[in-house]
Amino acid sequence: MQKAAFAAMILLLVGCINRKEETLRRSLHRTSGVVRLPAGVVEISSELDLTPGSKDLEIQGHPSGTVIRAAGNFRGRALIVARSASHIRFRNFTIDGNKTQFQKTAGLPPSDTPFAQFTPDNGILVERVGDVTISGVRLRNIAGFAILISSCANVAIENAEVEDSGSKNQTGRNNTTGGILLEEGVIGFRVVDCRLSRIRGNGVWTHSLYRSPRNGYGLIARNVFDTIGRDPIQIGHAYNVLVENNTGTRIGFPHEVVDVEGGGIPAALDTAGNVERCTYSGNRFEEVNGKCIDLDGFHEGKILNNTCINKGSAEDYPHGHYGIVFNNSNPDMTSERVVVSGNTIDGAKFGGIFVIGSRHSIVGNHLRNLNKARCNESGNRFGCLSFPKDPRLLETGIYLGRGAERPAVARHNVITDNEISGYKMKTRCIAAAPGVSLANNLVRNNRCADSVDGP
């Protein structure tokens, strides 16, 4: 008798849960106006799909709190999906992806496939929507991307919180997921005043396929990052983006989630694809297990008054690197006309700035406590001898290279008024790769010194 009563109670409870989910689904069928979400926790078994063609629709959390949670049997591209709509608002509720139920591993999509068509179990997925705002939304335990915006215009993401999100690839490393992704030509976007903590992959990321439209006219500002496995911010395939006044700590942590095999060495501010007329300004990061700023594909832009500080020893940063690195993987760009001014790199594992290309202005930077690895006296303990054709590369404060992914000799650059200190930096301050002439660059008034206390 007791077993029968218990079974009846379970059936009644399941029926109540299902009715709550169905009630929520019906409320989202409307195509305009305000939808007030119910109070409490609503578990869903499949994605909540807004009606295509919706316009002037606002989804609001209940004043006492709303949590939309993935059930153990959830299947879907995202918990909430909005497609082919306009003027959509999401405000003040929580999405719980219940990622402990999703222990699947996944790699990256094929090179011709956007993430929106590949990665399941996202938090909010928005495709082909004009004018969308996500404000005051908290997302946690998301297996895919917390927020995935694809092929949209006029996007505002503000005061969002993302926690404990992202999944792994087949080797147990991060697979880029967990944060906020804007892809496939998002034009006119703002990601501001958000907090992202314990994200396995990238924090805020713009990305497009090589043949797709680039992302443009964006602002990423005043966001706070804590414990990010890949990049807190990556600007990929974009133009006219301002990245300013963001802060973060523990970048490339925990060590075991860094995608070593896939080349996903973290950078506090990363760049990929063809990126032009962008500015990274006033950002500050501490404890970076990787690079401070990667400029792969960056040209005709500005790097101003950013700071990266590492206080530990070389052993504390197994994926530690240079402070600022120029690169040119994308075939459609040329590394030229970049202003690097007023930046502070304190405690890089290797050198301060690796330079390729031409007509850059590298002026008034503070490069302190460089070469924590003590290359090359430490032999190859930290990979110091990994570049036999450039034996001085990892021991030098500012190094002028022949190129990176493609040839691009450092020449016609202005390198002046920089402060450079660290292990033996008095004699290893500025150097050029074999075949590169310092005389073909304007190098003067740089202050070079050994660190008083050592690295």
Image: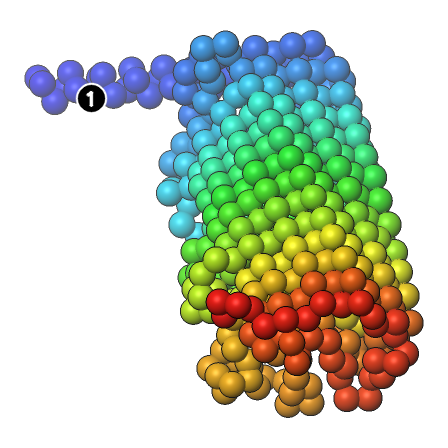
Q: Amino acid at mark 1?
A: Ala
Compared to 17, does 173 lie above or below? Answer: below
Rendered residue at 51%/47% (across/down) = 249
Q: Is residue 302 left or right of residue 293?
A: right
Which residue is at the front of the view, 75 or 358?
358
Compared to 143, does 365 lie above or below? Answer: below
Which image quadrant for residue 155?
Answer: top right
Rendered residue at 71%/41% (across/down) = 244
- Give the secondary structure at mark 1: helix
Which residue is at the front of the view, 358 or 416?
416
Q: Is residue 424 left or right of residue 52?
A: left
Which residue is at the front of the view, 79 or 9?
79
Residue 129's spot in the image, x, y percent?
76, 30
Rendered residue at 83%/72% (across/down) = 443
Compared to 241, does 310 lie above or below? Answer: below
Residue 94's spot in the image, x, y percent?
49, 25
The 10 Å Cα crowd at callout 1, few under 14, some 14 to 19, many 20 or more, is few
On the question of residue 238 being in view, the answer is: no
Which image quadrant for residue 5?
Answer: top left
Residue 38's spot in the image, x, y percent?
48, 12
Which image quadrant for residue 74?
Answer: top left
Rendered residue at 76%/81% (across/down) = 432
- Disc 1 designates what residue? 7
On the question of residue 383 being in view, the answer is: yes
Residue at the limit of the structure toward the left, as seen here? 1
